[in-house]
Image (cartoon, rainbow, N blue to C red):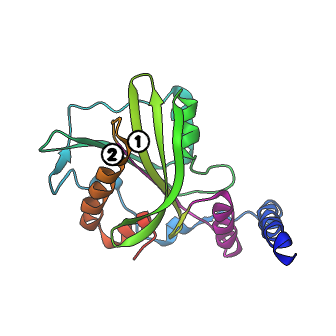
């Protein structure tokens, strides 16, 4: 009988915590102001292992409405396509927002893709082993006409990966109680392929070659791992 009430109790507690954010004094100090800053353009290598930036590829631009949202949420947006010696291409997007509060928060990618006319399938949440740690991630396949794009992505808030709505609310509440607004990263790795699992495996291999090349502090912020 007790188990029947445990989950509702947890949900209620988290809802109350989220509600508390609206009545607590909204912090105006950003945690990002207490940390070293990074330029994503300069910190993420354009060439590593068997990969280099493909200067011939033009990223699919977001709609004007989506671009407006991105500009409001993020301070930095890195968008690149890498190609290897086999001609395989992987798209990398890393975005950073110094103010992850109620009004300006990273959007779920399934929502963003849907808003641009993509159909979403195979949506799942699963832990992935990247850079020597486990990252709670989301996978999906976005389809629009002949374009089939398997996507892997995750969010960080502060120094931790947050997967669910309640995890984001809880992380935000903890920072608010300390008087800070958390910052956050969105990491998205995708490719064009009709073979979803093959594409996902290549994306993880790509990530495991990329992340060891990054500054350790930036790597920790992007993955939630030391």
Number of the label disc, if any, that sits on residue 150: 1
Picture quadrant where residue 44 is located? bottom left
Residue at image position (51%, 48%) is 74
Relative horizontal placement of residue 116, taking residue 61 as reference (left or right): right
Q: Nearer the viewer, residue 26 or 189?
A: 189
Residue at position x 18%, y 47% from top?
A: 52
Q: Which residues are magenta?
A: 163-190
* Quadrant of the image containing the C terminus: bottom left
Name which quarter of the figure residue 31 lies in: bottom right
Seen in the image, is 198 located left or right of residue 96?
left
- Rendered image: mark on residue 199: 2
Query: Marks 2 and 1: CB-CB under 8 Å?
Result: yes
Q: How far across and how far down the image is residue 217, in percent?
A: 37, 72
- Tell me the element at label 2: helix
As drawn, the residue found furthest toward the front would be 1
Identify the disc placed on residue 61. none
- Give the residue at x 81% y 74%: 3
**Residue located at (39% from left, 72% from top):** 133
Is the N terminus in the top left, top right, bottom left or bottom right quadrant? bottom right
- As drawn, the residue found furthest toward the top would be 145
């Amino acid at each position: 009988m007790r188990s029947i009430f445990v989950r509702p109790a947890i949900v209620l507690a988290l809802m109350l915590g989220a509600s508390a954010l609206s009545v607590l004094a909204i912090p105006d100090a950003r945690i990002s102001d207490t940390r070293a800053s990074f330029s994503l353009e300069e910190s993420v290598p354009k060439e590593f292992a068997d990969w280099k930036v493909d200067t011939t590829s033009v990223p699919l631009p977001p709609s004007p409405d989506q671009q407006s949202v991105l500009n409001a949420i993020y301070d930095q947006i890195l968008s690149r396509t890498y190609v290897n010696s086999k001609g395989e291409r992987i798209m990398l997007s890393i975005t950073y927002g110094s103010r992850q509060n109620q009004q300006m928060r990273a959007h779920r990618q399934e929502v963003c893709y849907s808003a641009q006319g993509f159909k979403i399938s195979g949506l799942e949440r699963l832990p992935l082993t990247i850079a020597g740690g486990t990252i709670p991630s989301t996978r999906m396949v976005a389809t629009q006409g002949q374009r089939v794009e398997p996507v892997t992505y995750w969010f960080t808030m502060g120094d931790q990966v947050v997967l669910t709505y309640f995890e984001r609310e809880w992380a935000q509440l903890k920072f608010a109680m300390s008087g800070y607004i958390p910052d956050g990263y969105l990491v998205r790795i995708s490719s064009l392929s009709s073979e979803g699992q093959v594409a996902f495996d290549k994306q993880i291999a790509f990530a495991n070659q990329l992340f060891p090349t990054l500054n350790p502090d930036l790597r920790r912020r992007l993955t939630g791992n030391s």
